[in-house]
């Protein structure tokens, strides 16, 4: 089993995935944004677990033959499944394949060596990955333990890569923290030394139809894909933005400078995009805010008149003070959508 990575051809700011059905032409960086924005992350992080978990010969010892069989079982399963997202399927299969290959060195070690190895790794993995992904602490006693260890290490890689993407994207979109800047600095230092990036191989493809040659990158590391797509975005002047819908915040490739919202399904309404949904939400909130202000003014003047007409009634004086004191907070709740206009009016009517 070889060359199962995600094969991407980059050419003139566009990229094409060669080894999935019905591929489209992507803008540089778009493959990565799509992966990080959607259901793909669920597949990469969670759904993958099914195969190592359900390996039928889990009680068997960790031998070269059994590892071969485990690898085939997991990788074939991942490649054959996930019709809805072939990119995530191809990537998860190749990342898992690479993780298993990295752990072949465990074969043939004594039980004591395996126990020592895993007790050390358990703490480090727990720091990176939530145990509920995996079940409980890892044990390297049989093939089930071997495959679950590989899955845990796979998760560490995937989560590190997602975090790294978040930092690079934050810097590109101008929403970075000091930590994000450090991450970019670290990458630039690494690349300036021409360090090789692990998990990516280059091949050359001849296209007979066009009589042309193209460079194809074969990825079996998410970190390598993150780095390559970042470089493509930088080199092609792609505008990466963070969606301004506060419930979303995903990164997207903006065609226009003024773009504020992404085209991914909106958290508020999965059937429509943030681009469609959020401007409607904000204009509705603005209308609610205007109506709330008007209703407040009416109530305020009504209460002030009542106070003036009844100077002896202490409660009427307190009502005016209380209303004015609480208004700011209530109005803010209407503006940010946590309080409906009806709730606001009910509050006014309680005086
Ligand atoms: Zn969005």
Image (cartoon, rainbow, N blue to C red):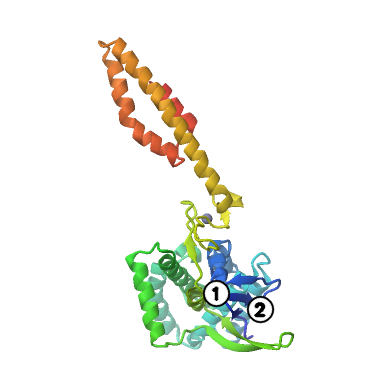
Asked whether 153 or 293 is in front, the reply is 293
* Residue at x 42%, y 77% (from the top left corner): 118
Judging depth in this view, the residue of 351 and 90 nearest the camera is: 351
Q: Would you identify the image quadrant in which residue 49 lies?
A: bottom right
Query: Which residue is tagged 2?
Result: 18
Label 1 C-beta lies within 8 Å of the nearest ligand 1 atom: no
Image coordinates of residue 334 in percent, x first then y, are 44, 37
Up the image or down, 275 lies above or below 70; here it is above
Q: Are marks 1 and 2 in contact (CB under 8 Å)?
A: no
Give above or below for 329 relative to 108.
above
**Mark 1 or mark 2: whose residue is earlier in sequence:** 2
Tell me the residue at 43%/26% (across/down).
295
User: Disc 1 to disc 2, how far (Cα)?
Assistant: 33 Å
- Packing grade of label 2 (10 A; few <14, some 14-19, many >=20) is some
Q: Nearer the viewer, residue 296 or 23?
A: 296
- Regarding residue 61, the answer to whether it shows in the image is no
Mark drawn on residue 144 = 1
- The answer to whether residue 14 shows anywhere in this view is yes
Residue 249 spot, x, y in % from top left: 47, 57
> Quarter-wise, where is residue 13 in the image?
bottom right
In the picture shown, does residue 338 fall above or below 137? Answer: above
Q: At 52% from the left edge and 43% from the top edge, which residue is drawn? A: 281
Q: Secondary structure at mark 1?
A: helix
Q: Residue at x 52, y 39 (%)?
A: 284
Q: Residues within 10 Å of mark 1 (few under 14, many from 20)?
A: many
């Amino acid at each position: 089993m070889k060359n199962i990575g995600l094969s991407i051809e980059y050419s003139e700011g566009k990229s094409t995935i060669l080894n999935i059905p019905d591929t489209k032409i992507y803008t540089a960086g778009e493959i990565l944004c799509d992966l990080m924005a959607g259901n793909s992350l669920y597949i990469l992080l969670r759904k993958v677990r099914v195969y190592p978990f359900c390996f039928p010969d889990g009680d068997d010892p960790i031998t070269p033959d059994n590892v071969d069989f485990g690898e085939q079982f997991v990788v074939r399963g991942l490649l054959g499944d996930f019709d809805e997202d072939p990119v995530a399927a191809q990537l998860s299969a190749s990342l898992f394949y690479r993780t298993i290959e990295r752990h072949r060195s465990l074969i043939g070690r004594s039980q004591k060596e395996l126990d020592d190895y895993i007790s050390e790794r358990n703490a480090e993995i727990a720091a990176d990955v939530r145990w509920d992904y995996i079940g409980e602490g890892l044990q390297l006693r049989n093939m089930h333990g071997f495959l679950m260890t590989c899955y845990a290490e796979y998760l560490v890689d995937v989560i590190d890569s997602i975090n790294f993407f978040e930092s690079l994207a934050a810097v590109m979109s101008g929403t970075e923290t000091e930590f994000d800047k450090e991450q970019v600095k670290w990458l630039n230092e690494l690349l300036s030394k021409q360090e090789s990036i692990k998990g990516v191989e280059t091949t050359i493809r001849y296209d007979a139809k066009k009589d042309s040659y193209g460079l194809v990158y074969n990825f079996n590391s998410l970190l390598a894909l993150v780095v390559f797509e970042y470089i493509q975005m930088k080199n092609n002047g792609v505008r990466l933005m963070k969606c301004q819908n506060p419930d979303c915040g995903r990164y997207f490739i903006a065609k226009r400078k003024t773009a504020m919202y992404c085209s991914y399904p909106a958290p508020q309404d999965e059937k429509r995009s943030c681009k469609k949904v959020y401007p409607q939400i904000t204009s509705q909130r603005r209308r609610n805010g205007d109506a709330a202000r008007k209703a407040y003014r009416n109530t305020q003047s009504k209460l002030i008149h009542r106070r003036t007409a009844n100077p002896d009634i202490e409660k009427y004086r307190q009502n005016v003070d209380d209303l004015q004191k609480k208004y700011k907070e209530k109005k803010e709740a209407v503006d940010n959508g946590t309080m409906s206009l009806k709730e606001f009016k009910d509050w006014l009517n309680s005086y």
